[in-house]
Image (tube, rainbow, N blue to C red):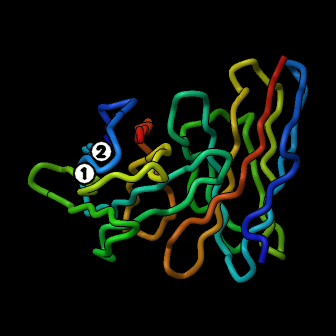
C-alpha cells in the first residue's frame, strides 16, 4: 500500500535550534517525494522536492531509499519557519496524484 | 496571475443536499486535481483531470463526481451530503514540471 507517515504531530523548538521533521513512506515503485508547507492563513505550497536537490529557506531533505525516508532538516530554526509541514509522494508514472502524510506542526519559539 | 482560484470560500449545506465546488487553474495548466482535507489530516486525493479526461480517482464513493471544461476549469460535485463530508476541499493545478499549485480551498460544513 502507498503510504506516507509523519510520526510527530507537533515539534517545538527554540530559535536557532536544529530541526528535523520525519517522513517515512511505503511505495512499491519509484516515487517522487515532496515537502509542502502551509503558513498561517496561507495556501499549501511546495517547499522542496527530492529530484531538484535544492535547499529552500535553509531546509534540505535527502531521499533514503534504504530506509524509505525523506526527513526535512534545517540547522538553525527561525521563528518564521513556524507552520504546518506535509510530506507527500507521487508516482512517476504519469499521474499527478499526491499522497500526503498527516502533517507536523512546527513551532519555533523566540 | 492570481494563482489557483476556488469558489466559494465557505459553504454550509444540509444533509442530503448536493454541492458544486469550482476551481480555476493557473493559466496554461491543463491538469486539475481535487483533494479533501478533514481536520487533523493531510489532504486526500479525490480526482485528477487532464485535458477534460479523468486521469485518476481516489477511494471516494460515487456520490463524488467531477468534470473539467474546455478552458481547464473544473467542478467537483458531491450528492447526498453526509455530515462526514464536512472538510476543506482543495484544488491543485499542475503544469509541465509536475509541481502542484494549490488554491485556498472551499470550507464545506454539512449540518
Q: Which residue is the site of mark 2? A: A21
Q: CA distance from mark 2 to mark 1?
A: 6 Å
Q: Report the side of A95 relative to B9 (left or right).
A: left
Residue lying at the far front in this picture: please name it: A110
The mark that comes first in sequence, 2 or 1, is: 2
Residue B94, quarter of picture: bottom right
Residue drawn 61% across the image and 37% down it: B37
| Position of A104 relative to A66 (above/below) | above
The mark found on residue B9 in the picture is none
Residue drawn 79% across the image and 37% down it: B78
| Image location of residue A110, percent across then percent down | 41, 41
Query: Which is more toward the observer, B104 or B47?
Result: B104
Callout 2–callout 1 Cβ contact below 8 Å: yes
Q: Report the side of B103 relative to A15 (left or right).
A: right
Q: Chain of mark 1?
A: A
Q: Report the side of B45 relative to B1 (left or right).
A: left
| Image location of residue A13, percent across then percent down | 32, 38
Q: Chain of mark 2?
A: A
Q: Which residue is the site of mark 1? A: A71
Amino acid at each position: 500500500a502507498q503510504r506516507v507517515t509523519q510520526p510527530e504531530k507537533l515539534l517545538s523548538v527554540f530559535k536557532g535550534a536544529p530541526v528535523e521533521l520525519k517522513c517515512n513512506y511505503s511505495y512499491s515503485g519509484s516515487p517522487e517525494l515532496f515537502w509542502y508547507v502551509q503558513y498561517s492563513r496561507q495556501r499549501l505550497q511546495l517547499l522542496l522536492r527530492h529530484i531538484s536537490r535544492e535547499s529552500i529557506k535553509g531546509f534540505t531533505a535527502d531521499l533514503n531509499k534504504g530506509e524509505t525516508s525523506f526527513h526535512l532538516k534545517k540547522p538553525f530554526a527561525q521563528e518564521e519557519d513556524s507552520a504546518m509541514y506535509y510530506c507527500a509522494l507521487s508516482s512517476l508514472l504519469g499521474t499527478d496524484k499526491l499522497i500526503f502524510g498527516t502533517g507536523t506542526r512546527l513551532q519555533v519559539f523566540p | 496571475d492570481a494563482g489557483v482560484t476556488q469558489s466559494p470560500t465557505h459553504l454550509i449545506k444540509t444533509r442530503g443536499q448536493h454541492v458544486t465546488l469550482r476551481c480555476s487553474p493557473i493559466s496554461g495548466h491543463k491538469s486539475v486535481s481535487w483533494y479533501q482535507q478533514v481536520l487533523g489530516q493531510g489532504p486526500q486525493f479525490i480526482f485528477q483531470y487532464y485535458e477534460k479526461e479523468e486521469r485518476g480517482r481516489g477511494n471516494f464513493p460515487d456520490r463524488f463526481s467531477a468534470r473539467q471544461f474546455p478552458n481547464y476549469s473544473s467542478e467537483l460535485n458531491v450528492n447526498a451530503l453526509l455530515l462526514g463530508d464536512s472538510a476543506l476541499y482543495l484544488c491543485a493545478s499542475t503544469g509541465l514540471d509536475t509541481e502542484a499549485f494549490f488554491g485556498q480551498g472551499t470550507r464545506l460544513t454539512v449540518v
